[in-house]
Image (cartoon, helix red, strand yellow):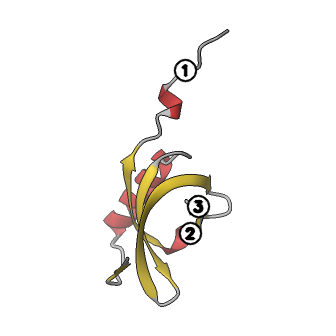
Amino acid sequence: MIVPPRVLSEDEREQLDVTLAQVRVGDVLRVVFQSEDVFVEVTGMVSRFCLEERRIDIVKRKIDLLKVVEMEIVEKSRIENETEPIL
């Protein structure tokens, strides 16, 4: 979905950093980011997340973290909360 462009305030940038610190592979995110000349909103599961490369993959889409203007964790991964039975 294409959404209107926007510029982040300092408070919004700080909130985005807080959200980024909580993201884990398997989480479902809603992300708004700049792609070429438009801003796009996608929702999907995080399949890869690398701060060093400044990249997050949602489903099969690679997103440059420097182009993200909004991020919301829609659903946390249950993987970190579950334990496997020991056989």
Q: Position of residue 30 (x, y in %)?
A: 39, 60
Q: Position of residue 53 (x, y in %)?
A: 68, 63
- Report the residue at 60% width, 54% height from top: 49
CB of mark 1 within 8 Å of CB of mark 3? no
Q: Nearer the viewer, residue 85 or 65?
A: 85
Which residue is farthest bottom?
Answer: 37
Q: Nearer the viewer, residue 67 or 40?
A: 40
Mark 1 residue type: Thr
Which residue is farthest front?
Answer: 87
Q: Nearer the viewer, residue 61 or 33?
A: 61
Residue at mark 2 to residue at mark 1: CA–CA distance: 31 Å
- Report the residue at 49% width, 53% height from top: 45
Tag count: 3
Name the quarter where the C terminus is drawn.
Answer: top right
Mark 3 residue type: Asp
Residue 43 higher or lower than 85, as above or below: below
User: Dot 2, how many residues are within 10 Å of its Cα: few (below 14), some (14-19), or many (20+)?
Assistant: some
Q: Which residue is mark 3?
A: 57
Mark 2 residue type: Ile
**Tag 3, which secondary structure?**
strand
**Tag 2, which secondary structure?**
strand
Q: Which residue is mark 1?
A: 83
Query: What label sits on residue 63 in the rendered view?
Result: 2
CB of mark 2 within 8 Å of CB of mark 1? no
Q: Position of residue 85 (x, y in %)?
A: 59, 14
